[in-house]
Amino acid sequence: MYKKYILYLFFLLAAVPVLAQTVAVNGTVRIQGTRDPYAQAKVYFERSHITVFTDERGNFSTAEITSGEETVSISGENIQLKRLAIFVPASGVLALGEIAVQPNIDIENPQPLMMAADDMLDDDNESAGQNISAKVILSNDVYLNKVAFQLSPFRFRVRGYQNIYEQKYINGVHFNDQLRGVFNFASIGAINDLTRNGDDDNYMTASTFAFGSIGGTENINMRASTYAKGFKATGTYTNRNYYSRGMLSYSTGLQDNGWAFTALIGGRYADKGNVEGTFYENFSYAFSVEKQFKQGQHSLSFVTFGSPVRRGQQSASFQEVYDLLDNNLYNPNWGYQNGEVRNSRVVTAYDPTAILSHIWKIDANTRLTTGVSLHYGKYANTALNWYDGPDPRPDYYRYLPSYQTEQTTKDYYTNLWTSNKTSFTQINWDNMYLANKLEEKLNDGAAIYMLEKRHSDLLESGFNSTLNKTINEHAKLTAGIAAKGTQSQQYKTVDDLLGASYVLDIDKFSERDFAGNNQVSQNDLLNPNAKAYKGDIFGYRFNINIRSANAWIQNEYSYDKVDFYYGTQLSYTQFDRVGYMKNGRNPNNSYGKGQSHEFLDYGVKGGLTYKINGRHMFTGNINYMTKAPLVNDAYISPRINDRTTDDLESSKIFSTDLSYIFSMPRLNGRLSVFQTNFNDLIDRFSYYHDSQRTFVNHALRDISQVNRGVELGLSYKIDNNWTLDLAATKAEYYYKNNPMGILNSENGQINNEMETVYLKNSYVGGMPQTVGTFGVRYFYDYWFLGANINYSGDYYIDQAPLRRLASNYITVNPADIELFDAYKSLTTQEKYDNYYTVDLSIGKIIYLKNRNSINVNIAVNNLLNDTNIRTGGYEQGRLDLSYPNKFLSKYYYMQGTNCFINVNYKFK
């Protein structure tokens, strides 16, 4: 009951007014040299904690500033941060006039090639490869600005938070999907020039458009009136997963009749990526239109965009394979077919999106922003499947020399690998076609080998409405409501029969383990022994329906020495599964509508800033929230049944941080300590169980995790030309308990086997926990030069729960040294080496006649990297004590030195 009283108290406090006088401040931001107006500059009044943005003519104004000394910071895309010290009078209007800002180089550091794990079941896990968000572009935070760009190749995560804790909005509408909890960055690929405007909130702080999240919140502004009038052409070359990118956009700006239009077309392409066997084909488009009524009192905008893509993937492999081939960028996914490279893991994705948004400026101090969205994401990933034939994957561990027991056999496989014959080291498409053709002659033509396509489509609609109210010079009220509906459609189809006539729709593992039981092996009892042809659905088909709603309110107060805020949120989530196949292993809970799951969650937050003076301050934030489980983790084996973990409940998150922030004429920065406690988390691992010889789903529940550490960001301006930057983190992300594991196999042989998994005091893998970057920047006469040295340390591998089951170690006798050491090798968490890289960049802005300009920049990354830097990996689900140090983990390596050349041409 006490929780309810706390919520009621927050709602009551959130509307307490304090009457006082306000002072108006206005000005115009222009580019130095050309005097062009700069639209969508972020103008931040540091003492008052007030943020406004310039309009299409570069103008800004606010009537919310208190009298006294104030510092104004101006930031935005491709301009250098500018800070002004001003004095605000006790009454009247303060006109700052024209404020000139210096252009900055348009260096978009190339994003690292983040590939998903080679998990045969996790075909829709794009989030594993997503980088840190571009939300920091507009941030004034020294630390976040530096680590996001410089450290993303190491798969660094700010404060160790997963992407689900970073929230993304577009035109005020929430866009993290409800299945995986992440934003689909692929949906805005190659439309970068239209996604740079916006507002962001670092970590869980006060927000103008959302309740917020511990990983930060960003609102991308794609309204047509926010783009400056003119054309912009962008051309890019890089030697990464694509080698060329182009964009062409045009904006009318806000016209006298209140209309504004913006359009863009773009794309990315590589017929052969830097990793062998990969390719990239992408076309993108965006269109935005806006109409303002009654001198801007009302604004109605519509935006639509899409970025269809087709790309070949890379997969991780064993270190033994990399060593045999002397190639840490080896990719086992491809092989030659009729002399042409063919990749077995091809992703096709398209997420067309439409957003309708309305802004109503009710009065000078009140604004209501309302928006609705609709998008239909289609995602598919191909993969090999086989029945009653040898494993076609070239790096299958039984094909490696170290697996062999006889020396002659070992030498035979060693010679095959070191000869680098692609018929052995890569996928042999010809052999698979030949096996299928022989089967057709000898029997009835059922496929031994085939290529399947696993679909994960998402239809989602959203609604958000946010009220911003300035009560007086000290108090602001922000409140919002939201609703979202999602339908996830999961199924697989026959992509290529590889010369066979059809594929028999049965489970090969069930047929083997339940010989003679024809029912158990059926994937669909409603269509037994079905023959699937090219394009047919087979294997599994189900929908997940998700509905949610939330309401939140927040109040902010600002005084001479102290600022504080507090807020609360209530949310409701409901989801269920609808199966369209009656699975033979689960005939009673696989077909039709399943159990409905409902969750009522809440969150509270608060923060305090104490200002020693205008240049030194302390800030503290604290929040507690419950969060409904992600649907993607809640179901144990959603492809074959409706089962979830027992007593499914919301996770609990408690987070706090304390910071010292300083801003002096030459030196500014932040020093922070933070800790976040996660409780009652759930997770699901899908892998091939080697001893059971079947795919399994291993769900973990009641996970407790701690993320804590120290952050430091510094920027020192030596003079008008030279600047030094430093950003570093020392942190610990570890498991606090031994969670319960629930194991289920897809062949029906293992059902709800519950057993403790020993994770306590082991580290959360998949990211470095100690990082740093030191940089030097030089600017003169619109020449820009930069150099950074980057460091990554305390990077641990992702763990396999199967290797840490309690039963594995009950009979282990420490006196048996050989066996004890074997088990120790299975449970010791691998730590990667510490690494350094160097990045260099150079650029120049050239101003032409008629205010046109060309911006050229070149970046060279990872100069100290000769492809020996591990940037990811995962443990295998294997407990073969005969080979305790082999075949246990697969790895990804960072690509070597890469070049990035970007040219922008802006013309009126």
Image (cartoon, rainbow, N blue to C red):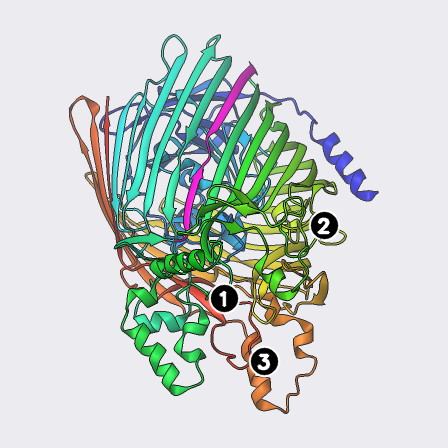
* Pointer 2 residue: 587
Locate residue 670 relative to residue 556 in the image: left or right. Answer: left
Q: Nearer the viewer, residue 714 or 195?
A: 195
Disc 3 secondary structure class: helix
Q: Residue furthest left?
A: 849
Label number found at residue 796: 1
For the residue marked with disc 2, what is the amino acid? Pro
* N-terminal-most mark, 3 or 1: 1
Residue 118: horizontal and vertical position, in percent?
47, 58
Q: How many angstroms separate mark 3 from mark 2 (CA)?
A: 39 Å
> 191 left or right of 886?
left
* Foreground disc of the pair 3, 1: 3
Q: Which residues are magenta?
A: 344-362
Tell which of 392 and 838 is nearer to you.
392
Q: Please state, as top left, top right, bottom left or bottom right, where the C terminus lies in the image.
A: top left
Q: Which residue is mark 3?
A: 823
Residues 1 and 905: in front is 905
The residue shown at (39%, 50%) is 146
* Position of 78 relative to 143 (above/below): above
Place residue 843 in its image quadrant: top left
Given residues 713 and 839, the one toward you in this image is 839
